[in-house]
């Protein structure tokens, strides 16, 4: 009998499979279905500060529109005022979902202003979230913004939220830093309880027929897992924070690879959106079967087996891997007697 239990940010989980933020967690019923399918925890869809502001502005507009109306029209107003909008709806979902399932429910926050990050994080905690994931989506469009400013923004947001709440706080990162490892260490020093690798930024396409820009958020593929897996293997044992893998999880083998690299938990959304909530059970059954086939009884026995060993020169390690990959590619194309030298690519 395999034991899949694990810990994430100090939280006890029945297994390392976590349903990451997606439309599947828009309702209490959706969260319940994910829990019934077997996931170890659920990250709710993100609360966006802009959306809260927009809904508040719309409410204010409707209120103002009714101030000069006849008294008879006021009977229509309470229906709008009583609706759960913005943070109220989200906080209600947090409270009801946390009470409906016996697994950790993690709130997700995508803020804009310093006050917004702090106020909404505190509210999410008070609503009953077991932890908070900071979904820091910041792509500086101003080419004059220095990279250090972008990095400091992440550290400052984390520091403010950590001062305001007592539940664990995870930071969901993008891979687009000039020195990803140094940013991870800075966030770790600032108190991050977990690092989630990686966020997938919006990558719009162009419709050449209609001459328009088409915003798209596509589902991830297993090939995209290589980048976060590489960084998880490099960070394992070098940060105190838990490491959460996300992106490119579709099969049990994908889950196993992330665990071997050193992930504490493996998050998935695309696979569940493709195959349905019940696919979580398929992934967990497959993971149990894989562990048994390799002779392991627990997840802890395999976690980090293929991480970069402590004390390794990380730069030399990565360089060596690159050179080996190029050499093998040459051999595959031209055979062992290929006249092409690896140095041609360096």
Image (tube, rainbow, N blue to C red):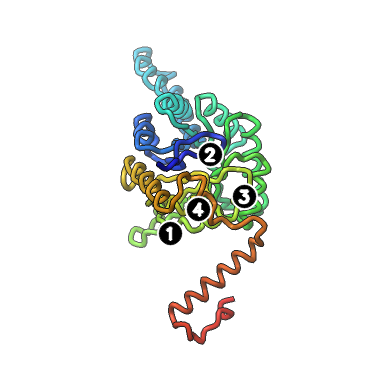
Q: Is residue 187 visible?
A: yes
Compared to residue 208, the image places residue 122 above or below, namely above
Q: Considering the numbered disc 1 on the image, is that residue within a helix, a strand or a loop?
A: helix
Residue 138 drawn at (x, y percent) = 56, 47
Give the numbered dot on residue 113: none
Residue shown at 56% from the left, 79% from the top: 342
Mark 3: secondary structure: loop
Q: Position of residue 89 (x, y in %)?
A: 43, 27
Q: Residue at x 64, y 61 (%)?
A: 314
Q: Earlier in the sequence, mark 2 or mark 4?
A: 2
Mark closer to the observer (2, 4) = 4
Tell me the SS state at disc 2: strand
- For the residues marked 3 and 2, what is the alpha-carbon distance in whole angstroms? 15 Å
Farthest residue to the top: give it: 71
Question: Of label 3 and label 2, which has the lower sequence position?
Answer: 2
User: Mark 1 or mark 2, which is nearer the start of the sequence?
Assistant: 2
Location of residue 150 in the rendering, given as x and y in whole percent from the top left corner: 63, 49
Q: Which residue is mark 3?
A: 237
Q: On residue 260, which mark appears? A: 4
Local crowd size for mark 1, using a 10 Å CA cut-off: few (<14), some (14–19), many (≥20) = few
The image quadrant that residue 315 belongs to is bottom right
Q: Nearer the viewer, mark 1 or mark 3?
A: 3
Q: Residues within 10 Å of mark 4 (few under 14, many from 20)?
A: many
């Amino acid at each position: 009998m395999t034991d899949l239990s694990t810990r994430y940010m100090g939280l006890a989980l029945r297994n390392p499979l976590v349903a990451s933020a997606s439309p599947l967690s828009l309702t209490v019923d959706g969260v319940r279905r994910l829990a019934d399918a077997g996931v170890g925890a659920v990250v709710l869809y993100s609360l966006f500060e802009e959306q809260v502001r927009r809904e508040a502005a719309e409410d204010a507009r409707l209120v103002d529109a009714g101030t000069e109306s006849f008294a008879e029209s006021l009977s229509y107003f309470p229906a709008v005022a009583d609706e759960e909008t913005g943070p109220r709806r989200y906080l209600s979902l947090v409270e009801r979902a946390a009470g409906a399932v016996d697994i950790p429910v993690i709130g997700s926050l995508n803020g804009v202003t310093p006050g917004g990050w702090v106020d909404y994080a505190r509210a999410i905690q008070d609503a009953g979230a077991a932890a908070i994931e900071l979904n820091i989506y910041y792509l500086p469009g101003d080419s004059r913004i220095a990279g250090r400013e972008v990095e400091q923004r992440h550290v400052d947001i984390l520091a403010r939220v950590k001062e305001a709440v007592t539940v664990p706080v995870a930071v969901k990162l993008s891979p687009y830093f000039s020195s990803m490892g140094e940013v991870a260490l800075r966030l770790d020093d600032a108190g991050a309880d977990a690092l989630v690798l990686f966020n997938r930024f919006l990558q719009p396409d162009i419709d050449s027929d209609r001459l328009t820009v088409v915003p798209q958020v596509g589902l991830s593929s297993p090939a995209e897992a290589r980048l976060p897996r590489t960084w998880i293997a490099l960070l394992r044992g070098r940060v105190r924070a838990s490491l959460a893998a996300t992106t490119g999880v579709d099969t049990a083998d994908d889950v196993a690879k992330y665990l071997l690299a050193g992930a504490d938990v493996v998050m998935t959304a695309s696979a569940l959106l493709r195959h349905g909530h019940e696919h979580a059970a398929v992934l967990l059954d497959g993971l149990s079967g894989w562990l048994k086939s390799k002779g392991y009884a627990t997840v802890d026995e395999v976690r980090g087996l293929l991480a970069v060993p402590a004390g390794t020169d990380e730069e030399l390690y990565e360089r060596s891997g690159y050179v080996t990959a190029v050499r093998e590619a040459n051999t595959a194309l031209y055979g062992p007697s290929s006249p092409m030298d690896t140095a041609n690519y360096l």
